[in-house]
Image (cartoon, rainbow, N blue to C red):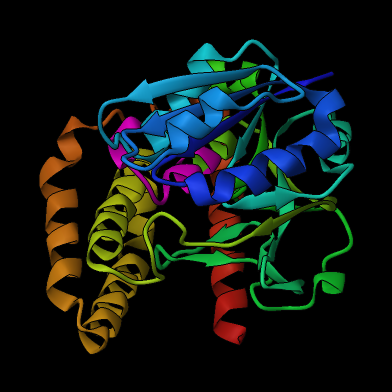
Amino acid sequence: MKVSVITPNYNGVKFLENYFKSLNNDSEYIGEVIIIDNGSTDSSIDYIQSNSFNFPVILIKNDENLGFAPAVNQGISNAKYDYIFSLNNDTEIKKGSIKAMLDLIKENNVFSVQAKMLQSDNRQLIDDAGDEYNLLGWTKKIGENQDSDNYSEVFEIFSSCAGAALYKKEILDKIGLFDDNFFAYMEDVDLAIRSQINGYKNLLCPDAIVYHIGSATSGSRYNDFKVRIAARNNVWTVYKNLPIPLKILNIIFLFLGFLIKYIFFVKKGFGSLYLEGIKEGLSTRSGLEKVNFKKDNLKNYFKLEYKLIINTLKFLKK
């Protein structure tokens, strides 16, 4: 089995040498690497076109920055292999990781497998071991800043982080790709919810190690662009995926979640931008494609609600 590695790039030439060098470690499992360049103005394209690699490299050139989600979708649409490895450009993959992920994703009803992402500058600490999502509408990295050894077993996660995740292409064809409207942020959680509604699960693969620099494109943990877009996408995630009964059931928690986040960003100096994102999400939600409710998926909605409750309780205990 081989994978199609799909990586968006925007002015990331400083990462590409290390990125390609690390992929050589698992080249026997790589059928192709698809780089989607989002209108880079640095020497990224020259670097890719002037070097040779141990696997076919397909370069898709966009005239402008279309965002993470549309870029990955371009790659998926052009992929030739049954497994899609979505990988950030600011990463270094440890030898044996792709094989470990392929071995795990073969299990029935598994949609995605998340690599254990470690911090590039402190390689014993977790950057992201999967994402949790709760009733407050909050996403939380699993294991962030904890010791890597604490996460040595396979377990089910709510969502794989698309920065280093393997997906089954046949399921993507069934439930849909990333939502182009999201541009970036929350697109992987939105996809994970759709996968669970359809009865699939997502797993952490602790034997797959990816070292991650983090915020390489957006530049920081909080900035004007990220705060506004993430707020908008949070609204869209709820609107698209939860049927009316679950929206009604969770409305108080969601209201509190958005209110607390607003107060938090006011203190950080981003309050008005956060509100702009919320307003944009509400005013544009009607243009999104909602997940159609199907009676056959009723039990999966109960499971989804249960996970949201558990994740909320875990968050409140910390």
**Residue 9 occupies quadrant:** top left
Looking at the rendered image, the quarter that the N terminus falls into is: top right
**Residue 224 occupies quadrant:** bottom left
Position of 171 relative to 25 (above/below)? above
- Magenta stretch, main secondary structure class: helix
Q: Please provide percent x and percent y for residue 122.
A: 71, 75
Q: Please provide percent x and percent y for residue 101.
A: 81, 38
Q: Please provide percent x and percent y for residue 145.
A: 66, 78
Q: Magenta stretch containing residue 37, yes or no?
A: no
Position of 11 relative to 214 (above/below)? above
Image: magenta residue range: 179-192
> Is residue 197 or residue 139 the one in the foreground?
139
The reply, left or right, for residue 305 in relation to residue 252 is right
Q: Please provide percent x and percent y for residue 299.
A: 60, 38
Looking at the rendered image, the quarter that the C terminus falls into is: bottom right
The reply, left or right, for residue 299 in relation to residue 59 is right
**Residue 258 occupies quadrant:** bottom left
